[in-house]
Amino acid sequence: MAYNGYMNTKQRKISALTVGLLSAVVVLIVGLVLALTIKPSQAPVVSEGDATTLPAPEITDGVRGEQFGVDKNINEETIDKYLGREDSVYRDMRMLIDPGNYAAVGGDSYLSGYVKGFETVPFPYIVNVSGLPDEVGSTYTGKTLFTQNDKGEVKANYAESLKILEDLFPKDKNIFLMCGGAGYAGMMKNLLIKLGWDANKIYNVGGYWFYEGDNNVAVKSTAADGIVTYAFWKVPYHEIDFNRLTAK
C-alpha cells in the first residue's frame, strides 16, 4: 500500500508500538552499559595506602643510611603513598620539648609539626639516649621504660615496660617510625629488633624536618609581631606516667 502522507488508526497504533519497543531496547542497552562501567556509590573505596604493596625495608645509600638507617623506599619523600593503612601503625619518636639543642644542627627542639596519621611516642622515655651529636648535648635523662648499657644489653625497669611497648608498637603490624632528623627513629628501630620485633616490618621513614608532602600538620606558628607559639594540643601524644608503674 502506498504511503500518501496519511495513516489510519491501525497504522498509527502499529507505529506507536514500534517506537515504544525501540525506546525500551535503547533504555535497556544504556542501563547495561552504565552498570558495567560505573561502580555503585556504596562500594567500598580502597585507599592508595591500602592498595600499595610494601617493599621490604632497605637502608638507603649515603650518610643518612649509614648514620641513621633511613629507608631507601619509604621515607620523607614517599611516605604519603603509604599513609592510612589498616595493617600499619605510625609513630613519631620526638618529645614535645626536647632538652637537647637541636637548633644547633638545623632542627627544632620543639615539636613544630608532624605528618598526619602519626602518633607521638617520646623515645627518650623509652630508653636512655646516647650518641647524640656534640652540638646537641644531652636530652632527657629522667626515668625510662628500659635501660641499655654500654654493651648494648637492654633491661626493663618496670613490670609493665614490655607490655607498654607491645601496645604502642604492635608486633602484628607494619611499624613506620619518624622523628625530627631520623636519629630517634633509627634508635627505636634498633631497640625493637633487639627486643624481638620482626626487622622486616619496621621502617625508619626519616625526619619531619625534611618532609614536604601533602599531609603536614603545623604546630608551630609565627605571628605578625614575630611571637612564636606551638599548638601542642593538636599532637596525638602518648605520655608515660612512671609514677603509676611497678618498678623492678
Image (tube, grey):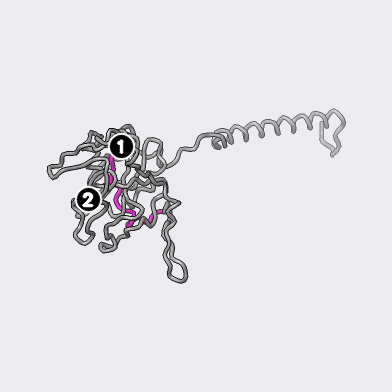
Secondary structure under badge 2? helix
* 179 vs 24: above or below: below
- Determine whether, in the image, residue 219 is placed left or right of residue 242: right
Of residues 215 and 100, the one nearer the viewer is: 100
Residue 48 x/y as whole percent: 42, 42
Q: Which residue is mark 2?
A: 68
The amino acid marked with disc number 1 is Leu
- Determine whether, in the image, residue 231 is placed left or right of residue 66: right
* 14 vs 71: above or below: above
* 233 vs 84: above or below: below
- Residue under the point 74% across and 33% down: 19
Residue 59 is a magenta residue: no
Residue 94 x/y as whole percent: 32, 50
Q: Which residue is mark 1?
A: 165
Q: Earlier in the sequence, mark 2 or mark 1?
A: 2
Neighbour class for label 1 at 10 Å: few (<14), some, many (≥20)?
some
- Residue under the point 41% across and 36% down: 86
Residue 140 x/y as whole percent: 27, 52
- Determine whether, in the image, residue 175 is placed left or right of residue 155: right
Range of magenta residues? 202-214
Label annotation for residue 34: none
Of residues 62 and 172, the one nearer the viewer is: 172
